[in-house]
Image (cartoon, rainbow, N blue to C red):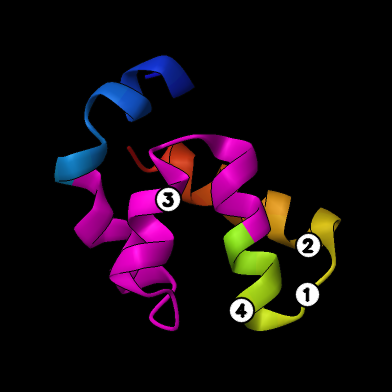
């Protein structure tokens, strides 16, 4: 699966993202719209982690789907 497919299936995958990053709000997930950079930004803002650390987490999550 690639990120274009993630964007297309975002409504189905939001629950998985919410499970992975429980501090994200529904609004955060709606704004991300399945876009990798927007998702990374939302996680970075909520968790206060570095961009590089968040990108690794997002890539690992992506690999599961």
Q: Which residues are magenta?
A: 13-41
Mark 3 to mark 1: distance in Å? 19 Å
How would you rate the neighbour count of disc 2 (Cα within 10 Å): few for under 14, some for 14-19, many for 20 or more?
few
Which residue has dot 2 on it?
53
In front of the other: label 3 or label 2? 3
Q: Judge whether residue 17 is colored magenta.
A: yes
- SS for tag 3? helix
Q: Earlier in the sequence, mark 3 or mark 1?
A: 3
The secondary structure that dominates the magenta segment is helix
Which residue has dot 3 on it?
31
Which residue has dot 4 on it?
46
Residues under numbered marks 2 and 1 in contact, where contact means CB atoms less than 8 Å apart: yes
Mark 4 to mark 3: distance in Å? 14 Å
- SS for tag 2? helix
Image x and y of residue 43, in percent: 60, 66
Q: Earlier in the sequence, mark 4 or mark 3?
A: 3
Direction from residue 11 to residue 62 in the image, left or right: right
Mark 2 to mark 4: distance in Å? 13 Å
Kindly identify the residue that appears in the image at 26 percent across and 53 percent down: 14
In front of the other: label 3 or label 1? 3
**Which numbered dot is residue 65?**
none
In front of the other: label 4 or label 3? 3
Residues under numbered marks 2 and 4 in contact, where contact means CB atoms less than 8 Å apart: no
Kindly identify the residue that appears in the image at 43 percent across and 63 percent down: 28
Image quadrant for the C terminus?
top left
């Amino acid at each position: 699966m690639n990120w274009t497919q993630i964007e297309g299936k975002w409504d189905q995958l939001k629950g998985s993202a919410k499970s992975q990053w429980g501090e994200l709000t529904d609004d955060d997930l709606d704004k991300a719209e399945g876009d990798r950079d927007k998702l990374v930004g939302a996680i970075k803002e909520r968790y206060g982690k570095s961009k590089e650390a968040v990108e690794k987490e997002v890539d690992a999550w992506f690999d599961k789907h």
